[in-house]
Image (cartoon, grey):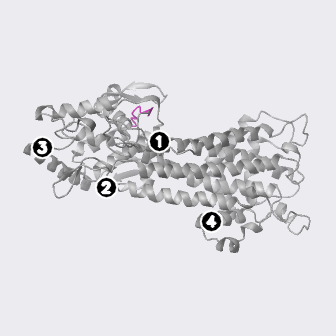
Amino acid sequence: MIVTVQPTGVTPADVIAVARGNARVEIAPETVTAMATSRAIVDNIEASGKPVYGVSTGFGALANTSIAPERRAELQHALIRSHAAGIGAPMPREVVRAMMLLRLRSLALGRSGVRPVLAQGLADLLNHDITPWVPEHGSLGASGDLAPLAHCAIVLLGEGWVLGKDGARIAAAEALHTAGLEPLELAAKEGLALINGTDGMLGMLLLAIDDAAHLFAMADVTAALAIEAMLGSERPFLPELHEIRPHPGQSASAANIRKLLQDSAVMDSHRDDLAHAVQDAYSMRCAPQVAGAARDTLDFVRTTAARELVSVVDNPVVLPDGRVESTGNFHGAPLGFAADFLAIAAAEVGAIAERRVDRLLDVTRNRDLPPFLSPDAGVNSGLMIAQYTAAGIVAENRRLAAPASVDSLPTSGMQEDHVSMGWAATKKLRTVLDNLTSLLAVELISAVRGLQLRAPLTPSPAGRAAIEALEPAAGRPGPDLFLAPALEAAREVVAGRALRAEIESATGALL
């Protein structure tokens, strides 16, 4: 696949394709023209001697310090070196690739006043699979993601580190030489343009949106299977009950669950049973209300990210009429708020899943299933400790759901006296979603075990597909086995797309 960067930017699908699919990056001729036009404005202003922030002055609290013309290129190189000040473990390859493409996109909009060679330099790193070593700590989401972007930019200069295929740290000069690439020499304003933006937090948010959309659909799958295994009722998911509370996410989730419960002998076995519970517990009956609210939150986050994806977040910016103006567009508050909101929603999707797991394992509430889903409980503990694991993850997600975006700390001699913490918000959101994958895996394996124990009753097509996907690793009900490999296999099933595709081939597309 080839992603062509236009002067209008890129799409979320483009970012995913480059970050996760190793798509090749090309720069449209129109983009080169737009960048060259913008650069000509900066060259004219510099020649005029007019003071412009970041071009003929220092940065941040040093904005009133004038820089002599002969030292302005040195200024840009010094900026990159001083701002590449992160520390900690390296960020994942997909995050760094997303960040580089998004910085390229920002430069391509033709408002940064830089030469096209900078955009080509970033494209070359992506196309040669050179991933800068970007430490996890360093960004406050203040003037965007200064330190992470500086760790990317310094590689263009032939300095800093890159991430080896084996996770080792390699000198950037060595990686460029191996790829046949030459280091760049920066001109006025170009160092600043390479690091002043929200590209790190936006990249993580776009990756999180992609993950959350899949996981929220899988949450409907695991909820439906758990409800089926517990002989729950499908009546709370009737469409007319959700039309009277018209939250779109709730209606979609309810429709999914109802669809997944069809053609099930397990459901048919108690449909007309007068002894059946009049009302199921909230964790069963209210599944669409919780997962649906998360879906609506995701829609809000998706809208926020889409707006940011067409935004100019550099500072200063070059306007078409020739003005160069300072701006605060690099402040990450919109992304930080969105990430914190989505982390709260995702944490609750996981929390209600854990409650269904607990109910499935409890002999007093699981409607005639054995304790902890073990046919020989006592000697065997079944899935008892899998629920412990889930409970611990729910507790961690609750801590991670505390918002980062309210935790501003002033920096740069009080010049940057309010920061967004957007990098921290999006980074912890990804952890919440990874934890949600584990929680849904525990629910999936518990629901599958429950459906196996309902034999000879035949489960729904979704249930049959789930059993077939998990049985190779989890086996059938019987003596206890080493459980961790089965849980890891369930995680892979939840995170992957194969089970969902198999289910949809039988039920139709899930919403």
Which label's residue is closer to the chain start, 3 or 1? 3
Q: Say left or right for 146 vs 12.
A: left
Say whether residue 475 is visible: yes
Which residue in the structure is indicated by mark 3? 46
Q: Which mark is residue 407?
A: 1
Q: Secondary structure at mark 3?
A: helix
Estimate how packed mark 4 is, as few (under 14), some (14 to 19) or many (20 or more) residues with alpha carbons within 10 Å: many
Alpha carbons under labels 1 and 2: distance apart: 36 Å
Question: In the image, what residue occupies the spot 39% across and 54% down?
Answer: 308
Q: Secondary structure at mark 2?
A: loop
Say whether residue 18 is visible: no
- Could you tell me if the residues under marks 4 and 3 are in contact, i.e. CB atoms within 8 Å? no
Which label's residue is closer to the chain start, 2 or 3? 2
Q: Secondary structure at mark 1?
A: loop
Which label's residue is closer to the chain start, 1 or 2? 2
Alpha carbons under labels 1 and 4: distance apart: 35 Å
Which residue in the structure is indicated by mark 2? 6
Residue 76: image location, x then y, percent: 23, 34
Give the magenta part as a residue range: 128-136
Alpha carbons under labels 3 and 1: distance apart: 38 Å
Q: Amino acid at mark 4?
A: Ala
Estimate how packed mark 3 is, as few (under 14), some (14 to 19) or many (20 or more) residues with alpha carbons within 10 Å: some
Q: Secondary structure at mark 4?
A: helix
Q: Amino acid at mark 3?
A: Glu
Q: Nearer the viewer, residue 215 or 25?
A: 215
Residue 162: image location, x then y, percent: 39, 30
Residue 301: image location, x then y, percent: 49, 56
